[in-house]
Structure formats: structure tokens, C-alpha cells
Image (cartoon, helix red, strand yellow):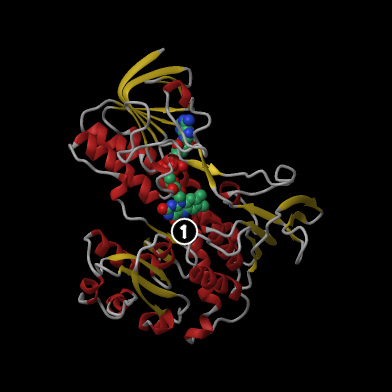
Amino acid sequence: MSRTFDAIIVGAGQAGPPLAARLDAAGMRVAVIERHLFGGTCVNTGCMPTKTLVASAYAAHMVRRADDFGIGISGEIAIDFAKVMARAHAVTLNARAGVEKWVRALERGAVFTGHARFTGPRTILVDGEELSAERIFLNVGGRALVPDMPGVHDVPLLNNSSLLALDHLPKHLVVIGGSYIGLEFAQMFRRFGADVTVVEKGERLVSREDPQVSEAIQAILENEGIAVRTGAECIHFAKHRDGVQVGVDCDSGDTEVVGSHALLAVGRRPNTDDLGLDMAGIVTDAHGYITVNERLETSAQGVWAMGDCNGRGAFTHTAYNDHEIIADNLLAGADRKVTDRIACYALYTDPPLGRVGLSAGAARAQGIAIKTAERPMTRVGRAVEKAETAGFMQIVSDAATDRILGGTILGTGGDEAIHSILDMMANGATAAKLRDTVHIHPTVAELLPTIAGMVKA
Ligand SMILES: Cc1cc2nc3c(=O)[nH]c(=O)nc-3n(C[C@H](O)[C@H](O)[C@H](O)COP(=O)(O)OP(=O)(O)OC[C@H]3O[C@@H](n4cnc5c(N)ncnc54)[C@H](O)[C@@H]3O)c2cc1C
């Protein structure tokens, strides 16, 4: 059987559903194909369940610190792990149902549940049906990468999906990968009461950040009793009677860590290997990311790629923005480009790291002459009042023009306060402009004008 639509969207992650709604509202007949769970990674095994768990972990942490605030709590605190996980699942289920209901309710939409695969330039096979359309939008996302490490297939390793399905707290969780996903899980499981070891191949944690950020985050985690093993160049796995043995080094230091559970969090890979892209002449890069131009058009005419699968972003907000770029260009005659986007993201350790634009290190590496200033959170009134003084804030501006190039806030409220710098950058503002802006007292963001007034080469 064969059916024709105005548009086909493959994947109901963070870009597919809102694009379907825009196209439907513009009068197009849209087919939406989803092979697994509506809402994709963010809703089901990514942002939403993890940030719900981060909130539970924060609550546990603050209860343990109650005495610091003059509040007496008698006895040991108890973590009801089943209830903690049930709360995360409830948030996910609610969001997933909302996305599915939304997509199924589209006036001219048709939903197909199954694996989509190209059979030709404009045709896709799903569940035995062939669908064709002049426009095809790929929103197939990604999954956890399983690198070719010795023994990786011989032991039960967890990933972000299977970890979220655990029904009991691991005794000792070994997290392989000291980057964004691994560190969020590491801190939350420590706060739930597990022993946690982070094993990182590189010389420092979150190695994409400046060394100062890596050092501060490592100190924050170690203060909570998390063991951090960096420079683990020779990671390998073997079965052990107590769980999983993780070999971390070949010839120096403690050569192994034994965990009851091990989480592999060493990166993501795009879901593009089983899409039949060659049937449509769609080109990918060496890592499988679909090659797109700045308007997110693939090498095949009439086919766009958005979200994690195009390698132009790895976040929910970038996936969502991709759909806006495509929809505005197609439906509103706009000329939006992915290159107009200012890079921004957060790492949801506690305190969180909010980042926008260039860090000082990245700017210098590009040969840009910069001015910069920073302030430790110990000198931020709101942080002191909350007794959450770990971290620092930094602003980077161009030495020649004074335009703000980037910012870093590792500190309480950093994920929110960073938007103050982001919005200034979106308007092309200088550090002097931020300096002269009055912010609300007492907030973390209140110190940003002060820092902006101190930038120097
Ligand atoms: C643990 C974790 C925490 C995260 N936390 C954050 C965070 O705090 N903030 C943030 O911004 N980002 C976070 N992310 C990243 C975020 O989840 C992703 O960037 C986002 O989900 C990407 O959306 P997407 O639409 O590109 O893809 P996805 O959400 O992965 O959706 C792709 C969809 O396509 C479907 N699909 C794939 N192939 C096919 C096919 N052939 N046929 C039919 N359907 C198919 C999949 O089933 C899936 O539903 C996190 C990720 C992880 C793993």
C-alpha cells in the first residue's frame, strides 16, 4: 500500500512534533512516524527524568545540611529510592502522553508507529506501508555510544535508559565518562546514598570546558565523597563476583575499580545507521551525523535534518530551534540559519554550570584578544545567604570592540542567571552596556553588571 502526504516527519523527539503542528496549521497533510516513545530522549530517558532526579537529590542534600541552616532533624535520613524513581517516571509519562496526544490531534496529521526507512529519494517504508512526500524531515536523534573497549560486551553495563529503569539503589556505581551526562548521574546517585566512582579517560573532567571549571567541578564532587579517577587511558571491563570490574590503567595507580553497577556515559551516536539514507542520497559525516547546510537542508533536495542527528547541537533547545529555523524559512519566507544561534547549555550538577558563547580559553585558542573578569560565588550575596558558595562567574568580552563574547556561571542559579548574558549577546551588547544595567537585589545575576564593569585584558 502507498500513501502520499505533503510532508513526512521521522521521529517524534523535540523538533518533529512542533514542526508537525506548524505544517499542519499551514494546511499541509503531515505523516509523523515514531518507532518507540513519543517525546524521544529528552522526555523519556534524558532531560526530564534526570532533572526530576536531580531535584530529589538536591532535596536529600539539603536535608543532610539542615543543621547549617539552624534546622534540627533527628536520626538518619531515609531515601525511598522506589518513590524517587516513581516521581521521575510520572513526570516522563505525563509529558510523553502530552506529546502523543498533541501529535495525534493534528487536524491533517497521520501518525505511524514503527521504524521508518527510505526506499527511495522521497519514499519511506514504515510497518509495511510506503509513504511518499515532496518534503521529508528527519528528527531521529541519537543513543548512547558503546565504544570498542576491551570487555565492553562481556559485562552488564548500564546506559542512560537502563539506569533510569533500576528498581534498587546500586551499592557502588562506577561512572565511565566524566562529562555532562555522567556527572549528573554521579552526583545524584551519591546523594541517594550510593558509593560513586567517576572514571575519565582524559586528564580532567568536562574537558571541553576551561581547566578552571573542570577543577572546580571535581572539587565539588570530591567534597561529597565521589571518587574521581582521571587519566584512565586503558579502560577495560571484566566480570567480578561483586559486579563489574573496571580496569582503569595499565601500569600505574590503582589499576581497577569494582562496582556493583557500571554506567557507560562516554558520548552519543546518531540513529542514522538504519534509516536507508543511501537510498535517498543523503550524506553523513564519519560519525554518522547527517550533513546539513546552515538552513538544515541535507544533500538530498526536499530532505531536512533537525535535532541531535545533524550534529549541529546536542540539546533539546537546539533541536527545538532547528524546527523553528526550518518552519520559518519554509512557511514565513524567512532566512534563518543555524549559524545565527549562540551556543548555550547547562550542566545540571549542583551547583549547575551555565555556559554561553566562548569561554576565555576557547577565545584565546581562536586567537581572539579578550578582556575578562570573574568573581567567586563566595562574594555573591545571594549565594552566601543560601550557604551555597561553590563556583565562580566569568564574563569574556572582545578586547577591541568590548562586545560580550561569552560567559560562565558555575554556581547556585547559574542555569538561570546565564540568560542575562545570553540575552545581552543576542542583542550584540558590550560589557559596558551590561555594566550599566540595573539588576534585582539580591540575586546571583545582580553581580553580572559588576563583573562586566571589571573586564580587562
Ligand atoms: C541523560 C541525558 C540527559 C540530558 N539532559 C539534557 C538537558 O538537561 N538539557 C538539554 O537540552 N538536553 C539534554 N539532553 C539531550 C537531549 O535529550 C537531546 O538533545 C534531545 O532529546 C534531542 O532531541 P531530538 O529531537 O534531536 O532527538 P530525540 O529526542 O532522541 O528523538 C528522536 C526520536 O526519533 C525516533 N526515531 C529514531 N529513528 C527512527 C526511525 N528510523 N523511525 C522512526 N522513529 C525513529 C526515536 O525513537 C526518538 O523518539 C540529555 C540527554 C541525555 C541522554
Tell whether 201 sits left or right of 407: right
Above or below, 318 against 250 in this view is: above
**Which quadrant of the figure has residue 311?**
top left
Q: Amino acid at mark 1?
A: Lys
Label 1 within 8 A of ligand 1 by Cβ: yes
Q: Is residue 71 visible?
A: no
Q: What residue is shown with label 1?
A: 51
Q: Quadrant of the N terminus?
A: top left
Compared with 62, 126 (above or below) is above
Q: At which x and y percent is residue 366?
A: 40, 59
What is the total number of numbered labels drawn onto the structure image?
A: 1
Q: For this view, does 309 lie left or right of residue 224?
A: left
Could you say whether the residue bearing mark 1 is in a helix, strand or loop? helix
What residue do we see at 25% from left, 64% from top? Answer: 424
153 vs 40, nearest the viewer: 153
Residue 64, image x, y percentages: 56, 77
209 shown above or below 319: below
Q: Residue furthest top?
A: 1
